[in-house]
Structure formats: C-alpha cells, structure tokens
Amino acid sequence: MRSSSTTTLLLFLLSLTLGGLVSCGPVEYMGQVGVKASKAHSALKTAQGETYSPYEYWSAKYYLERARHKAGYGDYQDSVRYGKKSQKMSARGKRIALTKRERREEIRDVEREAASREAKGEGVERPVKLKMDVTSKRKGGQ
C-alpha cells in the first residue's frame, strides 16, 4: 500500500497535468493572437500598410478581429488559426508596403534631382526631333 504523501503527490501531479491540458487553448491563444498577430499587425500599420498594401492590411485586420471573436466564444482552435492567418497576411503586407514605399521614395529622389538640374540648367537634355519621311511608297504604283 502506498503512503498518503505519495498518493497526495500523484493526485497533485495528475491535477497539474489535467489543468495544463485544459488551459492549452487559452494559453496558445494568448501567445498567437494576443502577442504575435497583434505585433505583426502593428508593424504593418507602422509600415503604412493601409496605403501601400491595402488588401493585406484589411485581411490581417479582419482575421485578427475574427480570432478575438472566436476566442470570446471559447473556440480557441479556430481563434489560433485566424491568428496565424492574420500574422501571415501582416508579414506579407509589411514586405509589400516597405518595397512600394522604398520605390516611391527612389522615384521622388530622382524627380527632385532632375528638377534641380533643370533649374540650374545643367545636364538638361534637349528633345531630339526626328526627321521622318511622310511620303511612303506603296506597292502597286500609287
């Protein structure tokens, strides 16, 4: 027969294990939706995702909202799934937004440089007029 302290210890360990299994959904939800997906969406906002990658921005936003909604009803598995989709769309949108913003800034820099050169009269290329033969000879003698 086991001693009462051994039995108590086993019951305690069993209750910790069962308690851990029951709380996996909320714990995973907090890790995925509460931290990772929220941070990713904030990074997308910072990268001006609404302007440069609107599809990804709004998809990520609504996936995040849906994840929170599902968690409110205790459906943590779907909540975590939506959180992962939100995180993925946020990362994609951030990459697109940063690329587009960088391109736009490069174009502005080139335009500013061209405008300053034109104002100074340096390196301005004059348009070349091409001489074209407007009289074309058609086959058939006309």
Image: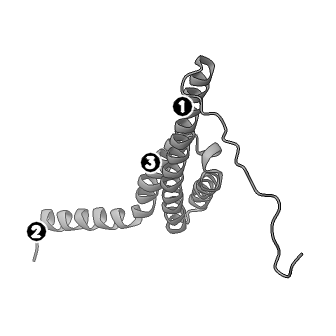
Callout 1 amino acid: Asp
Q: What is the spatial separation of the Cα atoms under label 1 and label 3, in whole angstroms?
A: 37 Å
Residue 25: x percent and y percent? 44, 63
Q: Residue furthest top?
A: 120
| Mark toward the start of the polypeptide (1 vs 2) | 2
Labelled disc at residue 35 = 3
| Residue ID at (55%, 41%) | 101
Q: Residue furthest right?
A: 142
Residue 63: x percent and y percent? 60, 58
State left or right for residue 58 relative to residue 122. right
Q: What is the spatial separation of the Cα atoms under label 3 and label 2, in whole angstroms?
A: 45 Å
| Residue ID at (53%, 43%) | 103
Callout 3 amino acid: Val
Residue that label 2 marks:
3
Quadrant in the rendering for residue 133: bottom right
Residue that label 1 marks:
109
The quadrant of the image that shows the N terminus is bottom left
Does 49 sit above or below residue 112? below
| Mark toward the start of the polypeptide (3 vs 2) | 2
| Residue 129 at least partly seen | yes
**Which type of secondary structure does the marked residue at label 2 adopt?**
loop
Quadrant in the rendering for residue 110: top right
Callout 2 amino acid: Ser
Does 2 sit above or below residue 27? below
Q: Nearer the viewer, residue 15 or 113?
A: 113
Label 3 environment density (alpha carbons within 10 Å; few <14, some 14–19, many ≥20) = few
Residue 13: x percent and y percent? 23, 64
Looking at the rendered image, the disc whose residue lies closer to the viewer, 1 or 2, is 1
**Which type of secondary structure does the marked residue at label 1 adopt?**
helix
**Which type of secondary structure does the marked residue at label 3 adopt?**
helix
| Residue ID at (39%, 63%) | 24
| Residue ID at (48%, 48%) | 40
